[in-house]
Image: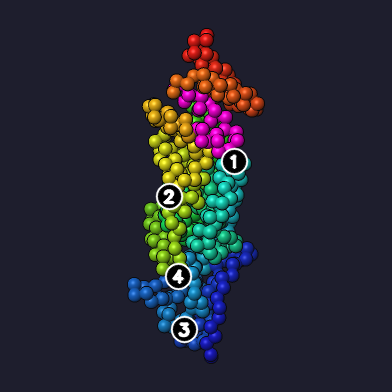
Amino acid sequence: MKLLILTFTIIFISLQITSGQSDYRGIALKNINGHSAGDTIDIFGFKQNSSGKSSYLIGNGFNEKYVSSAKLELLDNNLDFWQVVWLENQSSHINSSGWQMDLRSTLRDDFYEYASQMEINGLVFRDEYLEDYLRQLILIVHPQALIKEVPSRLNILMITAIKPEVFTFDNGCIVITTGMLAKTRAEQELLTILSEQTSHVVLDHNLMNLTMEIRSESNAEFWSAFATIASAVAMEFSNIRYGTNFHVGDLVLTGLSAAAISDALVMSAGASFTNEQKEHSRNLSETFMEDLQQRENFEYLPDKEYMINISSAISLTAWQEYHHHNYDQAMRYMDRVFELGIASEEDYLLRAKLTRTLSNTYQSNAEALRLINTALAMHDFDFVEALAEKGLLLIRLGEVAQAREVFVDYEEAVSEMPNIPPGRNVTWASRMLIKCDQLMQKR
């Protein structure tokens, strides 16, 4: 029979199918297990030996066996990297065990609940430019649809959190914190992170780690508790870039809760990967990155351009570090933003606050005041915190009369703002005016 070379396309298995089924086909080059040369045979797995020669898994159940590529030719020789990884590692397992759709459905529902709670509580970081850039990276790492029981694509969700963290859900959503993004310094570094997480998804590590012991507890109770924690954590991040002050107890509580969110969720979603799973994924990531660099016309973004793309995450993380009293770390993030020459009025305000916090010389105070004036001149924005900061710096510099004028403006501004929490509110402004009068010996 004349060989017919067909173009191969992955077709996702429908929801009604309860057992594994191969989407891969090969042409028998010789008589194999009852098949004649030229027959089309289902392929359920793939492996390569140390010399690079391929073998394909054929048959079903107890009759499975690996057949040398000298006897069987894969109909598509242009499988991408992750398709080969899946074929080599997961296809045989799916063939024998099925898709385990009930457990995958549970994991998928977990993702929907998690994403919903993060969105409701304002913990999803929204920056359309950065989101678009991350989508471009996802298409570099895994341009094809994932091989799952439900058609899905690799996706990414940014969460506002100071802790550098990344984990995945079984449906292909990679969750990455702004703290993790801010920590990276080059596109290659972020692509390595994304490819490693992709490996966990392709290898079904979440599903492997899901235990019925965890699921024996009420799912509703777990997510009810999770929602309460998420709501508490949201307090830490609401208006954090606008100088809103919280009680110290709130900061400590929400800081601990942020860790609790991750730890509880990661365990529930099967994303607490074993050392063996991490090692396997790292090795695959390294291989993928090596292959990526061999692609024709592929180049990483220059580091400066990459940093510009993620600058909003860097800025936000700097504010979070400041509110956690990690002033030196916050300043290091600000140094990166200012080195790029893309600082916003918010960045100028934060750098001024950090300069005042970390030093008390005439030169440092004058520099902080220059930063504040630059911020105020850049835009007519609602950062009343900038006025408060300017007043404090003027007092440091001995310009008490000017400081008093600034605090008058501040008092007028905050008196028109609803729902100002305890801290630098109208009462604080009045006290600062009294303090200025005292310093000028008017009272």
Instruction: Find out whether the residues at labels 3 and 1 contact each other: C-beta distance under 8 Å.
Output: no
Residue depth check, mark 2 versus mark 4: number of the one nearer the observer: 4
Label 2 – label 4 distance at C-alpha: 25 Å
Residue depth check, mark 3 versus mark 2: number of the one nearer the observer: 2
Label 4 – label 3 distance at C-alpha: 39 Å
Q: Amino acid at mark 2?
A: Thr
**Picture disc at residue 296:** 4
Name the residue that disc number 2 marks: 184
| Residue at screen point 41% across, 68% down | 294
Name the residue that disc number 3 marks: 32
Q: Which residues are magenta?
A: 372-396
- Secondary structure type for disc 3: loop
Residue 376 visible in the displayed image = yes
Q: Residues within 10 Å of mark 2 (few under 14, many from 20)?
A: some
Relative height, residue 56 to residue 310 (above, below) = below
Q: Residues within 10 Å of mark 4 (few under 14, many from 20)?
A: few
